[in-house]
Image (tube, rainbow, N blue to C red):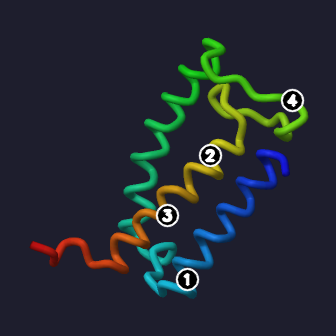
Amino acid sequence: MSYTQLAIVAVAIAVSFDMYLFNTQLLKRKVFWTSYAIIIGFQLLTNWWLTSRNIVMYSPDAIIGFRIAAAPVEDLLFGFALVLGVMSNWIRQDVSRRP
């Protein structure tokens, strides 16, 4: 399975968990998109730094080739899935109410 396929599957799983399994509905909340806007800026900066210096390299066969800030678009998809998954899980577990 290519990195592109894995990234798409990760997004589909995270969205399914958020919208249906955990029913946290983060994707419908303005606070999520505001938080994600902050996170994606740092993600793009970090991805640019790592990929433009060849610290992290990708096989051309594993990605579609479209890049944003020198990083494959798949990194943005995978990062989105990670952020959504973690935030959905935090809300599901109601971490704020734990001692």
Q: Is residue 22 above or below residue 32?
A: below
**Real-space Cα separation, disc 1 to disc 3, in angstroms:** 11 Å
Mark 4 sits on what residue? Answer: 60
First in sequence: mark 1 vs mark 2: 1
Tell me the mark number nearer the camera, choosing from 4 and 2.
4
Q: Which residue sits at x=52%, y=56%? A: 82
**Real-space Cα separation, disc 1 to disc 2, in angstroms:** 20 Å
Mark 2 sits on what residue? Answer: 76
Quadrant location of residue 56? top right
Label 2 neighbourhood size at 10 Å, few (<14), some (14-19), many (20+)?
some
Q: Do the residues labelled 1 and 2 touch (CB within 8 Å)?
A: no
Describe the element under mark 3 as helix, strand or loop: helix
| Mark 4: amino acid | Pro
**Real-space Cα separation, disc 3 to disc 4, in angstroms:** 27 Å
Q: In this view, does 29 lie to the left or right of 57?
A: left
Mark 1 sits on what residue? Answer: 19
Q: Which residue sits at x=82%, y=39%? A: 63
Is the C terminus in the top left, top right, bottom left or bottom right quadrant? Answer: bottom left
Residue 77 picture location, percent across and down: 65, 52
First in sequence: mark 3 vs mark 4: 4
**Real-space Cα separation, disc 1 to disc 4, in angstroms:** 33 Å
| Mark 2: amino acid | Leu
First in sequence: mark 2 vs mark 3: 2
Mark 3 sits on what residue? Answer: 84
